[in-house]
Amino acid sequence: MKVAILGAGAWGTALAVSIAGRHEVSLWSRDPAQAAGLSASRRNERYLPGIDLPVSVSIAATPAGGLRALADTHELVIVATPMSGLRGVLAALDGCAAPVAWLCKGFEEPAGGSPGLLGHEIRAAVAPRLMAGVLSGPSFAQEVAQGRPTALVAASEHAQVRDLLVAAVHGPSVRVYGNDDIAGVEIGGAVKNVLAIATGLCDGLGLGLNARAALITRGLAEMTRLGLALGARAETFMGLSGLGDLVLTATGDLSRNRRIGLLLARGDSLPQALQSLGHVAEGVYCARTVVQRAQRLGVDMPIARSVVALLDGRLSPADAVADLMGREARTESEG
Ligand SMILES: NC(=O)C1=CN([C@@H]2O[C@H](COP(=O)(O)OP(=O)(O)OC[C@H]3O[C@@H](n4cnc5c(N)ncnc54)[C@H](O)[C@@H]3O)[C@@H](O)[C@H]2O)C=CC1
Ligand SMILES: O=C(CO)COP(=O)(O)O
């Protein structure tokens, strides 16, 4: 199969490496200098150090205006930009015949009257003709590139898109499960990033394993409440893109979102933490949107709210924790 991967950060590059043995892959970078560097060195040292690009990966440096023509020569298009790039890329692809799937996890930032949308909502707004879906689940790019065992979810309302993603990505070290609850899969992937900042903070402050388990469990309850209010199915949150990715990101030190929490706990400012990270941390960009959309639906998300107060500088790390622990007693099924 001919697969185009649009975005040459850590995850796009890792997926290209993972599927290259079975497919012809074009890896697109928006930056001509990065594309030239990838072609020359056959490595992406900036985003995925130490991994060689297989020969079946070719580098594409088409200007953004040529994305539709590039897509038309492939059977599957995978968008591997951050959430901030998804709207522009989907708009450029509208009308292409090949199914499109994105890898990004988050809500886009609100702009121009839009409340901050999930990927499938962006697609409906800017590229209604695309057959589309999302590939999500617990998957650190480095481990996938190294061929370590990983399980993913291919979510779309179209069986054809799910099946194509399975055919493209399911292989010796990666299992891909289908799911038609795209809203649930996307909400899990977005909210777990916000919760990983909270657990990074908790661990950075040395609060202990009990506290971390409490945050993960109550965070899962928050994620599920928002999901149900947005029309998702509860069972999706017990699967790979919900509980699975939450456990990975909240506990695994490869997580950039968790690392932001660790850096804030040691006293870094948010700009310092983002600069030393050097990669996207989607939880930072979408925490406010998660809370705003939840509030509009009457859904209480106290952990996400504390993360926003921390990121906005309204609470210190210690006060953010005190804020959570100081809430009045409730039953487990309440917020
Ligand atoms: N790295 C990982 O382990 C995983 C990442 N993801 C998600 O994948 C998405 C991408 O993450 P990474 O590749 O890790 O990020 P990264 O920080 O490693 O790289 C981001 C890449 O996107 C490019 N980019 C930024 N804005 C763009 C735009 N508007 N158009 C085209 N390219 C653009 C940058 O130049 C860079 O090459 C994020 O939403 C992330 O949450 C999902 C699963 C695993
Ligand atoms: O989504 C991921 C793993 O599934 C990667 O998480 P981070 O963006 O926090 O590194």
Image (cartoon, rainbow, N blue to C red):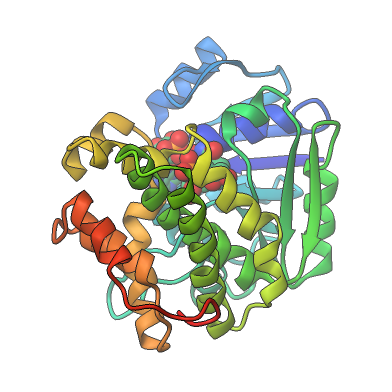
Total marks shown come to 0
Name of the residue lying farthest toward the front: 329
Q: Seen in the image, is 153 located left or right of residue 270? A: right
From the viewer's perspective, is residue 77 above or below residue 236? above
The residue at the point 58 percent across, 43 percent down is: 248
Q: Seen in the image, is 176 located left or right of residue 51? A: right
Horizontal and vertical percent for residue 216?
51, 56
Quadrant in which residue 181 is drawn? bottom right
Residue 262 in view (yes/no) = yes
- Please identify the quadrant where the N terminus is shown: top right
From the viewer's perspective, is residue 9 above or below residue 191? above
The residue at the point 25 percent across, 41 percent down is: 265
Q: Nearer the viewer, residue 326 or 114?
A: 326
Name of the residue lying farthest toward the top: 41
Residue 280 in view (yes/no) = no
Q: Nearer the viewer, residue 246 or 69?
A: 246
Horizontal and vertical percent for residue 55?
71, 17
Horizontal and vertical percent for residue 18?
72, 30
Q: Seen in the image, is 264 located left or right of residue 218? A: left
The residue at the point 27 percent across, 76 percent down is: 112
Horizontal and vertical percent for residue 236?
69, 68
From the viewer's perspective, is residue 217 above or below residue 201? below
- Please identify the quadrant where the C terminus is shown: bottom left
